[in-house]
Amino acid sequence: MASVTNKSAQTLRALLQRKGRPLILTNVYDRLSAQAVAELPQTEALATASYAIAQAAGLQDEALDFETNLAAVRGIAAVARQYDKPLTVDIQDGYGDKLEENAKRLIELGVAGVNLEDAELGTGNLYSVTTATERIRRLLSTAASLGVPDFVVNARCDVLALGGDLDVVLDRGRQYLEAGATTVFVWGGSKRGVSKVEVDKLVKGFDGRLNVMLKRSPDGLSVKQLADMGVARISVGPALQFVAMGALKREAEAILLEAR
């Protein structure tokens, strides 16, 4: 199993190292959404979004516990195996002192990588850069001990979302990469996002190893623009869940109105 999982991790890692061709992740949140996305020939990998998993469980993102997250991941991992696509999982901050134990349980399911946040779950406070980098090293060390030395860590940085400066993001991100992260996900917040100027500086600062969330709005950067700028990874977070639930509500309303 370890060799199969490491092969999947190698595939995921390779998808993040293609200059000018970012990995696009249309994040899923349960087995059904994973099946729909995995069936698409254009899908190269599967990824979860903790916010969407929490919503599906009737929780707020900050209240999502590991067991609830893992329950959703089990079904998604089964789909990933069925379609032979690498899976990366959003594990928020790794859930405190159980980081290694949780990583082991995910890797046993065949998970090839994770999204790891640098803000503490619950409080929202940033870990010190020393603690954040150490958690990346601990996670990668655990994966290596389980026979998955190519495990992928997408290190999320919440500095901008908390009102901090871009220079701090650049410093933290470089240290995360030095600690072994494959990419850095710079989260600007649901309303703020990350600007074109900021993306350009981050791509240069991280040598392209940047993950940004696609903002599908008139002022957002398109996939092509982000690809041309050299971004390595583009994700959509819970956006597809919003679309799916909106479509379900509209269709249900149309059916209900027919009876009147």
Image (cartoon, rainbow, N blue to C red):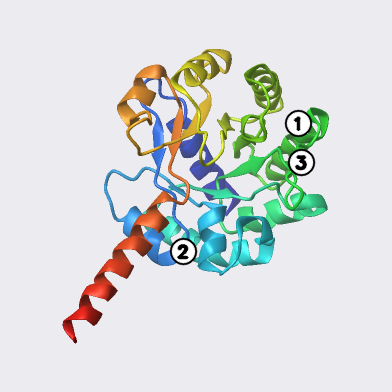
Q: What residue type is labelled 1?
A: Thr
Kindly tell me whether residue 233 is visible in this rendering. Answer: yes
Which residue, given by chain and number where applicable, does mark 1 sit on? 133
The foreground one among 114 and 259 is 259
Residue 205, horizontal then vertical, whole percent = 58, 14
In the displayed structure image, the side of residue 181 where residue 142 appears, left or right: right
- Residue most toward the front? 260
The foreground one among 55 and 130 is 55
Q: Which residue is drawn at 69% across and 51% down?
A: 103
In the displayed structure image, the side of residue 253 where residue 129 appears, left or right: right
Of label 3 and label 2, which has the lower sequence position?
A: 2
Residue 163, horizontal then vertical, whole percent = 66, 30
Residue 31, horizontal then vertical, whole percent = 43, 65
Disc number for residue 30: 2
Q: Which amino acid does label 3 sit on?
A: Asn
In the displayed structure image, the side of residue 239 where residue 54 appears, left or right: right
Which residue, given by chain and number where applicable, does mark 3 sit on? 125
Q: Which residue is drawn at 46% across and 25% down?
A: 17
Q: Is residue 140 depicted above or below 198 in this figure? A: below
In the displayed structure image, the side of residue 59 where residue 220 appears, left or right: left
Q: Is residue 163 depicted above or below 93 in this figure? A: above
Residue 218, horizontal then vertical, whole percent = 32, 33
Q: Which amino acid does label 2 sit on?
A: Asp
Quadrant location of the C terminus in the rendered image:
bottom left
